[in-house]
Amino acid sequence: MTVSLNGKVALVTGSSRGIGRAIAERLAAAGASVVVNYTQSASAAEEVVHAILAKGGKAVAVQGDVSHASEVARLFDEVERAFGQLDIVVANAAIFFTKPLAESTEEDFDRMFKVNAKGVFLTLQHAANRIKEGGSIAVVSTGATRMNMAGTALYTASKGAAEQLVPTLARELGPRNINVNTVSPGFTETDMMPNDEVRAYGASLSPFSRIGSAAEVAAVVAFVTSPDGHWVTAQNVQAGGGVAF
C-alpha cells in the first residue's frame, strides 16, 4: 500500500532526530509539506529539512518548546504562516531518563510530566482548535506503559497520562471527521537506545528476534494519518514487532 498525503500539511513535534525525524521524512515522502519542530537542536532540524528538500519534498524547521503554552501557540502560528493550513499533527516530542521510583525527586517528576504529559496536552489542544476538518492527529507513546521495567516509573506514568487524552479527544473531534490515535513503538533503534544489553533484551521479546527501526514506526504513523487509515480512531496502535507487553 502506498500512502498518499499530497496537498496535506503536517506538524511533527520533536522531529529533529530519532523516531520524530523518521516520521517527518516519511510524511514528506508521501507528499505532505512538513514542519520540523525542535526545542534546541537547530542544526539537527535543518539537517532534516535539507534531507527532505533533497528528495523533492517541502519542509521548514520551527523552534518551539511544547511544554510552554506561548511557544506552542507560536509554533502553530508558524505552521499556518509557512503553509496556510494544517491537516496532520503528530505529537512526538518527549524526554526520557531512568531512575528508581524511591530515588526520584519532585523535580524529576515535574521535568518528565512537563514535556511528556503537559506538552502533549498543549499540542493536542492547539491541534483541536486549528486542524482542518477531516484531519488526523497521532500521539507517539511507548509500549513500555504496558511493561514493568525498573527505573521507568516516571517515564511510563507521563506517557500513560498522555495516552488517556487520545480516546476522549477522538470522541470530541469525531463530528469534524478528525481521527485521533496513539502509536506506541516497542524497542526501537534510535539514539535513546541505552546499550547492547537492552537491545538484545528487546530483540528477545519479538517474534522477529530483533528490535524495530524508526522508519518502521514512521510507516505506522503515516498510515493512521492518511486517508487509508482514517477509519482507525481512538486506538492505541502497538508498533512493537509483536512484543507481548
Image: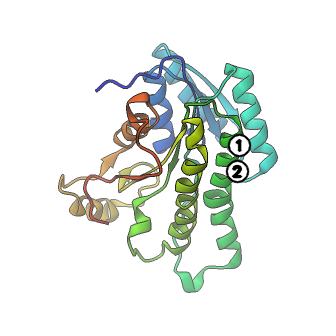
128 horizontally vs 101: left or right? right
- Residue at 60%, 30% (x, y): give it: 133
In the image, is residue 228 above or below residue 124?
above
Q: Residues within 10 Å of mark 1 (few under 14, many from 20)?
A: some
Q: Is residue 126 left or right of residue 197?
A: right
Please determine whether, in this image, residue 9 is positioned above or below residue 215. above
Tell me which amino acid carries mark 2: Leu
Tag 1: amino acid: His
Residue most extreme to the right: 70
* Label 2 sits on residue: 122
Q: Is residue 93 left or right of residue 188?
A: right
Label 1 sits on residue: 126
* 134 vs 237: above or below: above
Left or right of residue 147, residue 133 in this image:
right
Q: Pinpoint residue 117: horizontal percent, then vertical percent.
A: 63, 60
Q: Residue 194's mark? A: none
Q: Which quarter of the rendering shows the C terminus?
A: bottom left
Instruction: Estimate how packed mark 2 is, as few (under 14), some (14 to 19) or many (20 or more) residues with alpha carbons within 10 Å.
Output: many
Label 2, secondary structure: give it: helix
Q: Quadrant of residue 34?
A: top right
Q: Relative to 60, is 89 above or below?
A: below
x and y percentages locating residue 205 in the rendered image: 24, 63
**Residue 90 can be seen in this image:** no
At 42% from the left and 38% from the top, the residue drawn is 224
- Residue in the image at 56% along x and 72% along y: 154
- The location of residue 193, given as percent across then percent down, is 41, 56
